[in-house]
Amino acid sequence: MNTKDYIDRENQYVAHNYHPLPVVLTKADGIWVWDADGNKYLDFLSAYSAVSAGHLNPRIKKALMDQMDEMDVPSRAFYTDKLGEFAEMLCGLTGMDKMLPMNTGAEAVETAIKAARRWGYETKGIAKDKAKIIVSSGNFHGRTTTVVGFSSDAEYRRDFGPFDGGFETVPFGDIDALEKAITPETCAFLTEPIQGESGIIIPDQGWLKQVQELCKKNNVLFILDEIQSGIGRTGKNFAFQHEIDKPDGLLLGKALGGGIYPVSAFLASTEVMDVFDPGSHGSTFGGNPIAAAIGLEALRILEDEDLAGKSAELGGYLKDKLLEINSSLITEIRGAGLWIAMDINPAKATARNVCESLQQKGLLCKETHETVVRFAPPLTITKDEIDWAIEQVRNVLSEMDHAQQKQA
Ligand SMILES: *Cc1c(COP(=O)(O)O)cnc(C)c1O
């Protein structure tokens, strides 16, 4: 089997719901991955931030292997020894009271929606089936039918309706629009603190604080989706910690699974979490001992290795170096921690063109939308490795600039 064979077989038997770069990955170690021909690449995407601790992190691997000698998946029909410890550490780190374990990010979002609505009816006293959740334009919260139902991206929604309503959209980062949209029937405002899939869109400083105050004043739950921004990515353990003590609800996923296993969680105050009683919600795999052991180790690594501190320091360095690049292709560089967007001038090239050229140089990135290249390496990367990556970006942009000049 060569690269083409693998690609052909995958294309024949697997749904085309992704548009992968033409590389077949077969091995991984830390920040590096290898293709079927033995070529080595720096992973500058880290599975959309799921692999923040690096591929096959030895501590995550050991936590998994140790757990495999003990207990697998009993379901939550029974208590286990690991879930409480994981939940205690997660609550300690986030400042929240309780957690509800799920597997994928989208499931955590669904959990938050259920919690917010039930809290709206049973605690706030909203009339039956009238509860509204306000969301941000340009949001990404996953792919379930409920969640794409309130996406503002037509492609995420096309021909997947009917959608059942109960959501209202306001422009991301617009505090006045949010204030206007809130009514006595609003149970929650759900948003990302920084929008990842939308292209690393950063709101004005102070917005989270304003949102928190506004929600408090109006008895509306403030729920943050930190599935991509959490676990050190923005230079703090959680992005909300740049501005506020804690939200009312918090969603985590991706890196919570240490890069090897889906682990997600909805966290909230006791008051909110207590809307769930036995039978109201669940997940066969959610919170199983393997998930709990891995999640716990991912959090210990976050702390022991100060991944947030590294992200802040190296992210600042990477951003400065990118800002020094003089290329007609770049229209903007922005980011928080090791989570950086490079906007490409659409008159010159697509972000996809840039990603394909970077792949040739051994740097794996993925475009988001037509114009944004997202850089999100594992947080375990070193300064020297970042220097190498910057060199590849500089070379690719300079080659593309030259090709353009020749054409002109
Ligand atoms: C990835 C992501 C999700 C969905 O997570 P899945 O595990 O893919 O279901 C939800 N919200 C945000 C902000 C994300 O980045």
Image: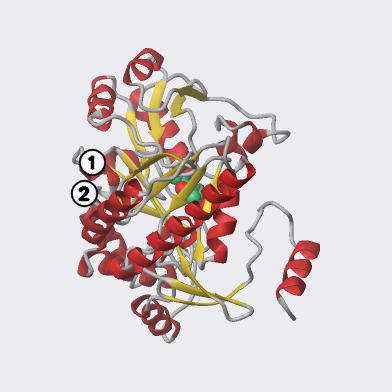
Q: In the displayed structure, would residue 50 be above or below residue 56? A: above
Which of the pair 274/268 is nearer the observer? 268
Left or right: residue 57 compared with residue 359 = left
Q: Position of residue 252 (x, y in %)?
A: 38, 51
Residue bearing mark 2: 95
Q: Position of residue 105 (x, y in %)?
A: 48, 51
Q: Position of residue 284 (x, y in %)?
A: 53, 61
Left or right: residue 156 compared with residue 88 = right
The quadrant the C terminus occupies is: top right
Give SS at disc 2: loop
Is the residue under label 1 in contact with that under label 2 (CB below 8 Å)? yes
Give SS at disc 1: loop
- Residue at image coords 64%, 71%: 24
Q: Disc 1 residue type?
A: Lys
Q: CA distance from mark 2 to mark 1?
A: 7 Å
Q: In this rendering, does residue 107 appear at all? A: no
- Residue at image coords 70%, 33%: 158
Number of residue marks: 2
Which of the pair 342/202 is nearer the observer? 342
- Residue at image coords 41%, 44%: 276
Q: How is the image coloured?
A: secondary structure
Q: In this rendering, does residue 211 appear at all? A: yes
Left or right: residue 239 compared with residue 283 = left
Which callout, 2 or 1, points at the residue further toward the start of the chain? Answer: 2
Query: On residue 246, which mark appears?
Result: 1
User: Which quadrant of the view contains residue 205?
Assistant: top left
The quadrant the N terminus occupies is: bottom right
Which of the pair 273/391 is nearer the observer? 391
User: Which quadrant of the view contains residue 333?
Assistant: top left
